[in-house]
Image: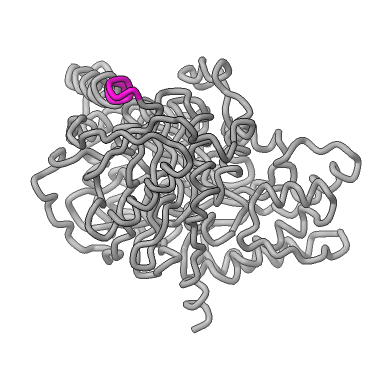
Amino acid sequence: MLYRPVAGFVVMASLAFVACSKQEPAKPYAVEEVPLSKISADLAAKTTTSVAVTQGYIDRIKMYDANLKAIILVAPDALQQAAASDKRRKEGKALGPLDGVPILLKDNIDAVGMPTTAGSYALAENRPVKDSEVVRRLRAGGAVILGKANLSQWAGRRSRGGASFSGSTVGGNPHNPYDLARSPAGSSSGPGIATAVSFAAASIGSDTTGSIIGPSSMNGIVGMRPTYALVSRHGVVPITEAQDSVGPMARTVEDEAILLTVMAGTDPADPASKDADAHKTDYTKGLKTDALKGVKLGVIRGYGGYDDKTQPVFDAALEVLKAQGAELVDVPSDFMENVAEEASRTEDFNFKHDLEAYLATTPPAVKVRTMADLVAFSKTEEHEKLHGTELLESAAATTDGLQNAEYIEKRELITRKAGPEGLGKALSQYGVSALVLLTRGPAPLLVPDGTRNPPREGGRGKGPPSMSQMAAIAGYPDLNVPMGMVEGLPVGISFVGAPWSEQDLLAYGYAYEQASHARVPPEAYKTAVAK
């Protein structure tokens, strides 16, 4: 089997990289907490090399990941990619600001040279022959594709209501670097952790109902779910084509803007992205410290995680926004209907339809071809059978695909409630450029695998909706920026805007970030290694 215990694999891989490199040893480069923008500048100034930077990240993965479980594997050609970048720079042929910069991918994103597993042994032999579109764009910009990061298996669409399962069978259960007993959130847990602890300059995650936003908040980093299909989803293991998104996860807003500039754009293989070229731009151009001056923002209180402990941190963030010239308008928390139950049901239909379409493109070595195959495999394979399959079974039981009357009715309902009658109405009615709110509360304690999940209080779809879910359903962009700490754990502030407003949201986030300097790097993961 390809997969070994993660830490052991990384050690072996990094040693192999060093052995096969024919270059002179590069001067070490200390990568911890160095922004992507600074690495890019240092590479351009030739004060370091991509080989040195890449080796710096590999060394950190080898040192710290055993306890974090953020990384599934390091690309076998990572140092060769770096050496090729150094050669381009030496010849004056750099491909742009990302040339030679190491980036990690969530392991549901196809990249030639590595399997795409979605965290399941069902895809252990899924070795793509073609890069996903987002990876093609990153490589065209010269980025070093450093490896694959862990995730919630099938991006969290496996079990519900039964025995808990916080990570993946392939990568293990990931841990929050601020407190290893805490959750890093999902499903982009690996990219969130890896970015927070400087295992790469940045990472690429995916988001269906908050899978970028949650891990970004709980791991103290910047994360954006872009407008629906601003970034192509082609070559990404799907949950639902109607909501899936791919976005950057970084330690600074500027780094986020650099990545999105390279990632965004129309892709014929993703028809939903047809308007992306008309809206994409160089997102770094709008980053200004005075971007909040005169901007009207709608403030939402009372959503998930808002309580006596988080309120003072959120209130302090609002004071920063006001000090930077923003006009704040209260928006009632009940402006939007919670459609979580209906949304979950639509995902059953999409997951079966869209995943089976993806599986049809995988190599012959992948034997799972249908949702029914996946359920059977997950119930019998030695690693997989230990976990519940409720969501897989619910998807497998759907009939008539996306022509099912129940699906059509519920999809129309949730899209209308989240968009025109929800976020769109709020932005228009209150005359605001964006909505701001606490992203979510601090990371909860990890629940051991196999623990029975208690029923949701009031049932699904009751109480305030999840903003990250509603923005995802509506296809609106959502940006998380670190906001501060609550009892030693990070929390974030979200900026949510109308479709194609990424440049404005990044500008607001940048102005807030530069005025607040609220991000506190994690340290607990180092102490765990020292012991």
Residue 429 magenta-drawn?
yes
Magenta-colored segment: predominant secondary structure: helix
The part of the chain drawn in magenta is 424-431
Image coloring type: one colour
Judge left or right: residue 11 versus residue 240.
right
Q: Is residue 348 above or below residue 165?
A: above
Judge left or right: residue 59 versus residue 168.
right
Residue 226: give x, y in percent of width and height.
Answer: 46, 32
- Give the residue at the far bottom of this rendering: 531
Residue drawn where x is 47% and y is 63% of the image? 69
Q: Is residue 309 above or below residue 117?
A: below
Q: Indicate the quadrant where residue 243 lies.
A: top left
Q: Is residue 489 above or below residue 469?
A: below
Residue drawn where x is 21% and y is 34% of the image? 332
Residue 524: give x, y in percent of width and height.
Answer: 46, 72
Residue 386: give x, y in percent of width and height.
Answer: 28, 59
Q: Nearer the viewer, residue 492 or 156?
A: 492
Residue drawn where x is 52% and y is 46% of the image? 249
Q: Is residue 386 visible?
A: yes
- Give the residue at the far left of this rendering: 458
Q: Nearer the viewer, residue 360 or 326?
A: 326
